[in-house]
Amino acid sequence: MFRSEGKKGAEAKEQTKLKRKQGSADERLNRLLDPKVRKMGIDVQFLEAQKAEKAYQRELDAARDQYFDDQRLKDDEYAVFLENKRQQQRAQIEKDVQNYRNSQQKKEYQREWDLNDPNSLKNDEIGRVHDFHGEDLGFGERKSAQARQLTSWLKQQEKEKMENYAADRAKDLLWQEQQEMNNFLAEDMENDRQRLRAEKLRALKEFNMEQARAKRMRELVDREREDNERQWEIYNQMNSDLLNEKHDNSRSSTDPNRYQPSGFKGMSQEERDRIKAIQEDQIRQKKLADQRRKEQEEAEALQMIENDRTAMMLQRQQDRLRAQISKNLAETHKQQMEEQKYNKKVLDEIYAPKITEDFFSQFQNSDR
């Protein structure tokens, strides 16, 4: 609640500040529009009042900043207090758990301790005649102790349960209070945001309306200017040489046989006839050139045929001559072979390696 009242007070100060600025702006505008004040000089009294107003405004800003700084410090201290309280509660819970473990969860309190006790034999009473193996002598005492222990545990659990419930309830109440405070602050901030947004939208709407009015005025002025320009353009076109079909004005000033592209309206009948005659002459010359080219191609084709025929005859003649040469060469080789065979036969007859009686008669003809 204190934050909400402080924020509302700050908003009231802001509104007062805005109104004061608006009033100062209006007074300045009136002074500027007043020719007497504008020409005679500056209002010293107003300047002093303006200085005092600025000093007062600076004091208000400093007080507002100090208020928000104090409020932030208080919030930080409260947050530190909550954090310390939470840590203390957590430490106390851990301490209680450890104490419970140390006091109520000892090894001696386990159900199987009589079987796992390492000193069971030392503590056992020996020498009694009536003791038998497996006899439970402390059954009644142990049963009553277990009942008392169970009752103590139940009471302790119930107490711890109530304490945990009270602690959880306190935490829930604290959290709920914090949530309510956060919701209130969020709602307040949302209202401020909606208000600022509405003011911005209103200012934007006014600005857009002013821009739309200025745009309509500009479009109106541009439309009037364009209409005037179109009218002047139509007037100039209607009175120009281009639409009045003046061929003399379209000729070039440097060459009478050339025309200006911007003012050319077409050729005269004589010029069209002359161009047509030139085109017909070109067509005739092209036909003659085509005829000559065709005759030349036919003559070249006949010459190629004749050349092919002559080449074929020469090739046949060369083939016949080559065949005759091959035949003569074969006959020469045949004759040489026959002569070689005859010479070999004669030589074989002359130099034949025959053994006669003269060969054997030369042996055993001397003592040596």
Image: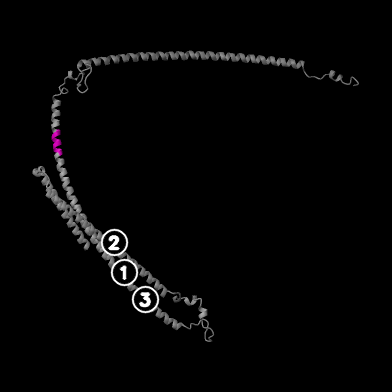
- Residue situated in front as seen by the camera: 308 or 120: 120
Assess whether mark 2 and mark 3 are in contact (beta carbons under 8 angstroms). Answer: no
Question: Distance between the Cα atoms at labels 3 and 2?
Answer: 39 Å
Residue occupied by mark 3? 156
Magenta-highlighted residues: 218-226
Q: Residues within 10 Å of mark 2 (few under 14, many from 20)?
A: few
Residue found 64% across the figure and 14% down from its top: 332
Residue 224 lies in the magenta stretch? yes
- Indicate whether 93 appears above or below 240: below
Label 1 CA crowd tier, 10 Å (few <14, some 14–19, many 20+): few
First of labels 3, 1 by sequence position: 3
Q: Tell me, what colour scheme is on the image?
A: one colour
Q: If the image is split into quadrants, where does the C terminus sit?
A: top right
Residue 333's quadrant in the figure?
Answer: top right
Task: Give coordinates of residue 357: x percent, y percent.
Answer: 84, 19
Tell us which disc is closer to us: 3 or 2: 2
Q: Give the camera-side residue of 45 and 312.
A: 45
- Amino acid type, callout 2: Asp
Residue 76's disc number: 2
Helix, strand or loop at label 1? It is helix
Q: Nearer the viewer, mark 2 or mark 1?
A: 2
Where does the N terminus fall, quadrant-wise? bottom left
First-in-chain label (2 vs 1): 2
Residue 181 percent across, percent down from the top left? 25, 63
Q: Which residue is mark 1?
A: 168
Q: Are marks 2 and 1 in contact (CB under 8 Å)?
A: no
Left or right: 340 as drawn, with respect to 235: right
Which one is nearer the viewer's eye here, 130 or 284? Answer: 130
Q: Who's the residue at 70% across and 16% down the image?
A: 341
Q: Is residue 46 visible?
A: yes
Q: Amino acid at mark 3?
A: Gln
